[in-house]
Amino acid sequence: MSDRPRTDLGWFEELYAKTEQDPPWQRERQRISLEQWVEAQGLDGANTKRAAVVGCGLGTDAEYIASKNYNTVGFDLSPTAIRRAQELHPDSNVEYVTADLLRLPSDWRHAFDLVVEVWTVQALPDPPRTQAIEAIASLVAPQGDLIVIAIARDDDGPDHRPGDGPPWFLNRNTINKFDTLTGLTARDIHLGPDPEAPDRRQSWTAHFTRS
């Protein structure tokens, strides 16, 4: 990989469309960290609340959130990812949408009771990472929740050096931006072993709300 990261996001579509194979971040079931958090919170959308899954890829996490009775939108920059998600889940209640995180529909602002962000931010250099953080936060409705899951750095080093990623393992300062830059409030920021690779890496599970 070049020492200079791409600041455009077209490589997501290139990766999905080039081989039609699953990308390296795809899983057959929802992220363990996400499931643990949702179950601990006892979440149930009661078929009235709305959820958005950021960078939904092939839809695994979106399908899980929909199973918790949320009216769920899964969106991704890649048209190929969205097409494949629809093909994989033909009877799904999820609304799969091609959308650019950095140019979100205006009617999505403050529109979702639950926003799920898993591993998208850490796939982006900075810029546009900070812009993406602000965009994700803009989706959260009043009294809504945002859950952020990301692989963590195990030191205080920078998480944005060219050549280190993607993905970039994120430090605490980057996770804090979901609070300090966006008007959201941090309810819990937990650093611990990633349950998918507990012997190899750490993971953030961070919960934010809008008053």
Image: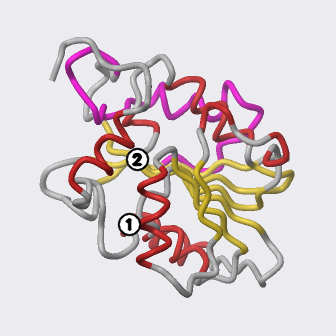
Question: Which residue type does callout 1 highlight?
Answer: Arg
Image quadrant occupied by the N terminus: top left
Question: Which residue matches tag 2?
Answer: 119
The residue positioned 82% from the left and 53% from the top of the image is: 111
Compare marks 2 and 1 and give the one earlier in the sequence: 1
Q: Is residue 81 left or right of residue 16?
A: right
Question: Which residue matches tag 1?
Answer: 31
Question: Which residue type does callout 2 highlight?
Answer: Trp
Residue 67 position in % (x across, y down): 58, 84
Q: Is residue 175 magenta?
A: yes
Q: Is residue 132 left or right of residue 112?
A: left
Residue 159 position in % (x across, y down): 33, 23
Residue 162 position in % (x across, y down): 26, 14
Q: Is residue 54 above or below residue 157?
A: below
Residue 31 position in % (x across, y down): 38, 66
Q: Is residue 62 above or below residue 121?
A: below
| Callouts 2 and 1 close, C-beta under 8 Å | no
Residue 209 — which label? none
Which residues are drawn in magenta?
A: 160-189
Q: Secondary structure at mark 2?
A: loop
Q: Secondary structure at mark 1?
A: loop
